[in-house]
Amino acid sequence: MSDAMVKSLPKINGFSLQRPKLFPMLVFIALISGISLFFVWSRIEVVHLEYDISRLEGQMRDIRQENRRLSLEAASLRSPNRIERIALSRLGLKYPSSDQVVTID
């Protein structure tokens, strides 16, 4: 008797009512959920990458500043006046006498 009730579904305004098909609806919901999760994941990855880029730009800025400081220090260490002062005071070197100088023509 229950089979007879299921097969004879009423008609409303010329349309017959049918049992809803669940599988296509579940596939649609799963597809929308998957796309939504992918979108959220991609946005999270973008935010993480922006944080990484910002951190790396800060490191680059610090390294450039240190490079400028070290270049200035290297230039001051190569200064002829400084080398002469160290040669005279620490190393005990002296200016050559006139008989020690050889000129080449």
Image (cartoon, rainbow, N blue to C red):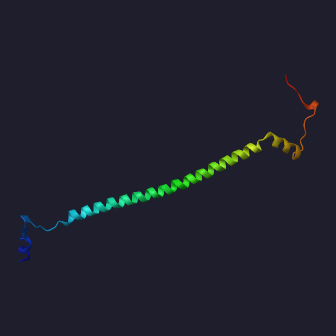
Along the viewing direction, whichever of 73 and 22 lies nearer the viewer:
73
* Quarter of image, res 13: bottom left
Relative placement, left or right, of 73 versus 98 is left
Along the viewing direction, whichever of 5 and 55 lies nearer the viewer:
55
**Vertical placement of residue 103 versus 52, above or below:** above
Relative placement, left or right, of 98 versus 66 is right
Q: Residue furthest top?
A: 105
At horizontal 62% and vertical 52% (from top left) the residue drawn is 62
**Vertical placement of residue 96 versus 3, above or below:** above
Relative placement, left or right, of 35 versus 21 is right
Residue 88 % position (x, y) = 88, 43
Residue 67 % position (x, y) = 66, 47
In the rendered image, which quarter contains the C terminus?
Answer: top right
Q: Residue furthest bottom?
A: 1
At horizontal 36% and vertical 58% (from top left) the residue drawn is 39
Residue 61 % position (x, y) = 60, 51
* Quarter of image, res 8: bottom left
In the rendered image, which quarter contains the N terminus?
Answer: bottom left
At horizontal 25% and vertical 61% (from top left) the residue drawn is 28
Residue 63 % position (x, y) = 62, 50
* Quarter of image, res 44: bottom left
Q: How many marks?
A: 0
Relative placement, left or right, of 27 versus 84 is left
